[in-house]
């Protein structure tokens, strides 16, 4: 009986979590730049994220080292929590409830659940449960 109750509770929690997800389109992300506004990390002066057609450029300015470092990740959007990083989905999926990114291996895969999307901001919950809020810096980047 306890197993049935636990299973029902687990299913309810899964349904509740997906109800709080919002979809995001690849066009919303593509060619845009965002600043991390929450949480505030004491060891970073600024954190920004830029989306190209196929990659995320994550830049962090480290206060102690007085140095900016940029990491490049492949990404796609997905409607499901991914188990592995699927390169075939890059540029193919047009909309999803999760942003999935990786250096190219499953070990480096990270996903963010989309919680809220507005014209000038969006918020996510990371695969580890941390909540990030991004504000748009530059609507269109021309390359």
Image (cartoon, rainbow, N blue to C red):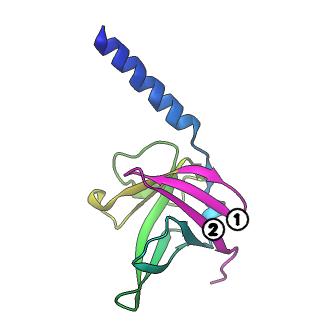
Magenta span contains residue 127: yes
Looking at the rendering, which quadrant does residue 35 occupy?
bottom right
Which percent across, then down, holds residue 93?
55, 52
Secondary structure beneath label 1:
loop
Asked if the residue at tag 1 contacts the one at tag 2, i.e. Cβ–Cβ closer than 8 Å, the answer is: yes
Task: Determine whether 139 is above or below 3 in the image.
Answer: below
User: Residue 57 has which mark?
Assistant: none
Q: Determine which residue is flagged by label 1.
A: 120
Kindly identify the residue that appears in the image at 43 percent across and 66 percent down.
Answer: 74
Q: Earlier in the sequence, mark 2 or mark 1?
A: 1
Taking the spot 35% from the left edge, 87% from the top edge, the residue there is 64
Marker count (numbered): 2
For label 2, count other residues whose C-alpha is less than 10 Å away and answer few (under 14), some (14-19) or many (20+).
some
Q: Nearer the viewer, residue 85 or 6?
A: 6
- Residue 100: x %, y % from top left: 45, 56
Callout 2: SS:
strand
* Residue on which disc 2 sits: 135
**Foreground pick, 6 / 91:** 6
Which range of residues does the magenta coloring cover? 114-143
In this picture, is 133 found above or below 114? below
- Residue 136 position in % (x across, y down): 65, 70
Q: Is residue 39 magenta?
A: no
Query: Looking at the picture, how far across and down is residue 138, in whole percent?
Result: 67, 77
Quadrant holding the C terminus: bottom right
């Amino acid at each position: 009986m306890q197993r049935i109750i636990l299973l029902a509770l687990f299913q309810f929690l899964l349904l509740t979590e997906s109800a709080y997800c919002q979809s995001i389109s690849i066009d919303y992300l593509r060619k845009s730049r965002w600043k991390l506004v929450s949480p505030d990390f004491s060891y970073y002066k600024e954190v920004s994220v830029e989306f190209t057609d196929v990659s995320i450029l994550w830049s962090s300015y480290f206060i102690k080292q007085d140095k900016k470092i940029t990491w490049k990740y492949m990404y796609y959007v997905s409607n499901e929590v991914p188990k592995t990083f699927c390169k075939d989905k890059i540029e193919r999926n047009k909309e999803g409830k999760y942003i999935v990114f990786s250096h190219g291996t499953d070990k480096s895969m990270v996903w963010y659940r989309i919680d809220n999307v507005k014209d000038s901001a969006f918020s996510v919950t990371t695969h580890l449960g941390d909540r990030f809020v991004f504000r748009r810096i530059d609507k269109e980047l021309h390359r």
